[in-house]
Image: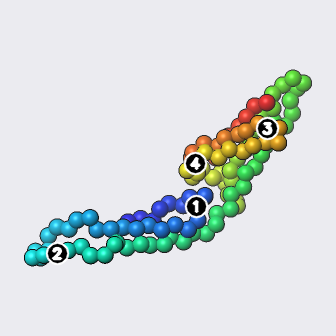
Amino acid sequence: VPAPSDDVFIDKSTQTVKITDTAGGNFEKLEVAGNGATTTINDTIDKVDVVLTATTTVGEGGNIVYTASLVDKNGAPVTNITNPLTVTLDNGQTITIGVNQSNGSVTV
């Protein structure tokens, strides 16, 4: 059974597997005993930064696009998120980064 994949939001977890059925072996009476096997999956904390960028110049009355991006410690995009992430800006606007996405934007 493979260990669960890396999740940037969850550090340590456990996985339990139980026997549900047996076949073969030619035993007169084979009984499944125990509650299964539990494995603790240790992980390291994966540092993820939210970087905010904006349109660098805009004409009067124009629109500014704010983009929030998730990056790892090397600056590479992080896309393995399993729940949407909402970033709230100090002007009240929100940016949502969707599942398996690395960025989201809002236009003001």
Of the two numbered discs 4 and 3 on the same chain, state the one appearing first in sequence: 4
Between the residue at mark 4 and the residue at mark 2, the CA separation in whole angstroms equals: 44 Å
Instruction: Tell me the SS state at disc 4.
Output: loop
Of the two numbered discs 4 and 2 on the same chain, state the one appearing first in sequence: 2
Circle 3 residue: 92
Between the residue at mark 2 and the residue at mark 1, the CA separation in whole angstroms equals: 39 Å
| Image quarter of the C terminus | top right
Given the image, on which type of amino acid does mark 2 rest?
A: Leu
> From the viewer's perspective, is 15 left or right of 33?
right
Given the image, on which type of amino acid does mark 1 rest?
A: Ile
Q: At which x and y percent is residue 105?
A: 71, 37
Circle 2 residue: 30
> From the viewer's perspective, is 38 left or right of 58?
left
The residue at the point 22 percent across, 65 percent down is 21
**Contact flag, marks 2 and 1 (Cβ < 8 Å):** no
Given the image, on which type of amino acid does mark 3 rest?
A: Gly
Circle 4 residue: 83
Of the two numbered discs 2 and 1 on the same chain, state the one appearing first in sequence: 1
Of badges 3 and 1, the one in the foreground is 3
Of badges 4 and 3, the one in the foreground is 3
Of badges 2 and 1, the one in the foreground is 2
Q: Give neighbour class at mark 4: few <14, some 14-19, many 20+ (Cα, 10 Å).
A: few
Residue 90, above or below 26: above
Q: Give neighbour class at mark 1: few <14, some 14-19, many 20+ (Cα, 10 Å).
A: few
Q: At which x and y percent is residue 86?
A: 68, 44
Q: Looking at the image, how many numbered discs can be counted on the residues?
A: 4
Circle 1 residue: 10
Q: Give neighbour class at mark 3: few <14, some 14-19, many 20+ (Cα, 10 Å).
A: few
Instruction: Tell me the SS state at disc 1.
Output: loop
Q: At which x and y percent is residue 82?
A: 55, 50
| Image quarter of the N terminus | bottom left
Residue furthest to the right in view is 60
